[in-house]
Every structure is written in C-alpha cells, then in structure tokens.
Image: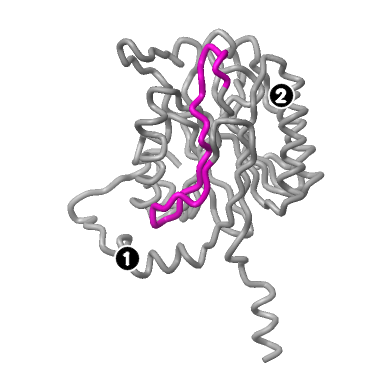
Amino acid sequence: AAEAECVNLTATPTAFRLALIQLQVSSVKSDNLTRACGLVREAAAQGAKIVCLPECFNSPYGTNYFPQYAEKIPGESTQKLSEVAKECSIYLIGGSIPEEDAGKLYNTCAVFGPDGALLVKHRKLHLFDIDVPGKITFQESKTLSPGDSFSTFDTPYCRVGLGICYDLRFAELAQIYAQRGCQLLVYPGAFNLTTGPAHWELLQRGRAVDNQVYVATASPARDDKASYVAWGHSTVVTPWGEVLATAGTEEMIVYSDIDLKKLAEIRQQIPIFSQKRLDLYAVEAKKP
C-alpha cells in the first residue's frame, strides 16, 4: 500500500485551473502592462496554474499601431511577463504583442514558465487578410510577416499547443498539435463584430471535437470607440464540444477547471485516433 501511495504522489496531476484574462486594452502601453500583470496576480491568487492574456494586449490592434508599439523579444513587455510568471510561479501565455526582429514585424505570443524562463515563442502563422464587403476589410500582411513554426510547450499537466486568432480557422494546425500529444490548444485572439458572432464559438467547438482536446481563447475586452472593435467572449471548450466557461464583453477573468480524466474518457468512448484511415488520407507537418 505504501508503494502505491508513493506512485500516486508523483503521478501527473489530472486537473488544473486555467485563467483567461479579458483585458481592456488602451493606447498607453505602460498602463496595459501594469493592469495585465495585476490581473495575472489576481488569477494566480485564485489558484490558476496556466494564465493566458489576449492577443495584442500591450497595444491597440491595427496595422498603423503595430510598427509604433513593436518591441524585441526579450524586451520591455516580455520582461514584465517573465517577472510576474516567476513571482506567481505559473505558466503564463503572454497573449500576443507586435514583435520586431531583423527589420520585420510579427504578431507574437511568448510563453513563460514558473521560473520566469521563456518556453516558446509563437509567431502568428496565418495573417488576417479578409474582405467582407460593407462589413470589414483588414490586411495584417500590410505590416506583419508570418511565422513559420509550430509551437508547443510542456507543463506538469499536459502539453499545450499555441495559435493566434486567425490560426484558429485552420483545422490542420490543430490536427498537427493533437498528433504531437497536445491536450489543450490556446488561441489568444481578437475576432470582430462580423466574424465573432458567426464563427468564434463555432470554430473553437469544431477544433475541440475534431481533435478531442480542450480549446481556450483569450480576447481583449470590447471597446466600442476603438478603430478595431474586438468581439470579447473569451471561452473554454471541452473535448466533448461543451462551452465550459465564457466571458461577456467587459474586462474580466474567466476561470475554468480543466479535467484531463474527462479527456481520456472521451477518447476511450469515441476512439477516433485509432480509427483514422491513414491508408486514405493524412495531415502531415512539413517542418519540425
């Protein structure tokens, strides 16, 4: 019995608390950083072990803002994230910031571990270039360059896969992450008042059910006076496709207890991974 007890103590924890910070982003970078770190501390005090900030949390969202707010990584914003991750002993998914590197700009998510170390840097792979006549036209590629690598990191709970906003629309990315053993996919994102009501929740539930993973999104809070109005509604979806938790439009923290036993049960009940017809089709990574 004593032996079994020892085994249990070192077993992988099967549940943990996730927090999504739906930050109200202003045009003052220092203020965004201060308030983001304050909310991270609050989430950690409520027992969150993985905390996620929204896309473009230190800057207004827009092609004219990206060059003005861009920083190196490491730089001012990521230094603050590293410090608060270490202080709170959490995994911190730093939403995204405009990153400058060798004359190019990227929309980049930096992740920090409980010791404050940079674990991975995800540069948005799919740039948001859309044109819905009379509703919304946006061209991220005017100022940003796309990243070109997959981004996962390990925690004591599970492996996590990262995407940013428009990356959520691409089922292949989520499938690669599932193949690589991710059980949670996190997408900091800022959908808008056209695509938000139509697709935001639908896409998350689709990615979750197709891959039998938890999916979480962190959006900025809505600011009706901004040039780009974010949808809000930061959300967590289970591998069964249920919405576990969701925000409204205002600044708030969304908490969700992630149960990996439930994920294992779903995969056992509906064993799609062992039933794929790899003789007929495949989704494969072309890069590591």
Residue at point 30%, 11% (across, down): 133
Q: Mark 1 points at which residue?
A: 271
Q: In this view, does 270 lie above or below 47?
A: below
Residue 233 counted in the magenta span: yes
Coloring applied to the structure: one colour
Is disc 1 in contact with disc 2, using a CB cutoff of under 8 Å? no
- Label 1 vs 2, first from the N-terminus: 2
Q: State whether residue 110 appears in this view.
A: no
Residue sitting at x 58%, y 47%: 153
- Tell me the quarter of the image containing the C terminus: top left
The secondary element bearing badge 2 is classed as helix
Q: Residue at x 54, y 62 (%)?
A: 259
Q: Is residue 110 on the magenta stretch?
A: no
Asked whether 218 or 148 is in front, the reply is 218
* Magenta-highlighted residues: 223-246
The residue at the point 50 percent across, 11 percent down is 143
Q: x, y (%) of residue 10?
A: 67, 72
Q: Nearer the viewer, residue 133 or 7?
A: 133
Cα separation between marks 1 and 2: 44 Å
Q: Classify mark 1: residues with Cα within 10 Å, few (<14), some (14-19) or many (20+).
A: few
Q: Residue 32 carries which label?
A: 2
Answer above or below: position of 118 versus 157.
Answer: above
Total labels: the figure holds 2
Q: How would you rate the neighbour count of disc 2 (Cα within 10 Å): few for under 14, some for 14-19, many for 20 or more?
A: many
Q: Which residue lies furthest to the right in this view?
A: 87
What is the quadrant of residue 40 in the picture?
A: top right
Q: Is the magenta stretch mostly helix, strand or loop?
A: loop
Q: Residue 285 carries which label?
A: none
Residue type at mark 1?
Pro
- Rendering coords of residue 163 (x, y %): 48, 36
